[in-house]
Image (cartoon, rainbow, N blue to C red):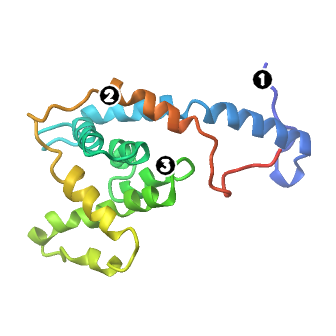
Amino acid sequence: MTRTVSFRRMQDGTREDYLLLDAAERQYAAGLGGRVLEALRKLDHSLEGYRVSRLGHSLQAATRAERDGADEEMVLAALVHDIGDELAPYNHADLAAAILRPYVRPEVTWIVAQHALFQNYYYVHHFGGDRHAREQLREHPWYDGCVHFCAAWDQNSFDPDYPSEPLAHFEPLLQRIFARPPHDPRYVRSG
């Protein structure tokens, strides 16, 4: 039988209760890489209409980033930038950034969080939208990085003939980064 906490309301929890939960959460968090891989695999059968699956798009973006000499965190960002499409189709970038935030530097998280706005440059004018809406962020220090992310790795990764690396190629990188202790102080617990 699995141990459970003694409380029914969090305010009634004891130190022992919260130590138990902390240990359970750390054990669960250790499996994040596997869950992210499974979520990526699901992208192979989602959102029809493109010439490649969402997984194929993600693999192309990550392959392009890697071949372009991007560091590991940016390659991972390119791989998982659209992982939120399944559960958050209208704010997928925020979901992907939230998954990455504890494990990568703030620049990478910001670029992933903003990539949807920056991608609008390529198509939103066809619907009467403002393709230059990203200009509101022009003075941000990572603006040019996000422009590059979208121009070099995201918007052009819908080519069924592009020779992408398979998911297995990126699995060690993904597992390594998601196995890191979270470095954002908001996610670090004291025991």
**Where is residue 186, by image quadrant?**
bottom right
* Tag in front: 1 or 3: 3
Residue 185 rendering spot, x and y as whole percentages:
68, 57
Q: Is residue 115 above or below residue 2?
A: below
Q: Which residue is mark 3?
A: 100
Report the quarter where the N terminus lies: top right
Query: What SS does tag 1 mark?
Result: loop
In primary-sequence order, the first of circles 2 and 1 is 1
Q: Which residue is mark 1?
A: 2
Residue 71 x/y as whole percent: 39, 46
Q: Amino acid at mark 3?
A: Leu
Q: CA distance from mark 3 to mark 2?
A: 18 Å
Pick whichever of labels 3 and 2 is earlier in the sequence.
Answer: 3
Residue most extreme to the top: 1
- Between 48 and 112, which is closer to the camera in this rendering? 112
Q: Is the C terminus in the top left, top right, bottom left or bottom right quadrant? A: top right
Residue in the image at 81% along x and 32% along y = 4
Q: Does dot 3 land on a helix, a strand or a loop? A: helix
Label 2 sits on what residue type?
A: Leu
User: How many numbered circles does the render carry?
Assistant: 3
Choose top left, top right, bottom left or bottom right for residue 29.
top right
Q: Tag on residue 167?
A: 2
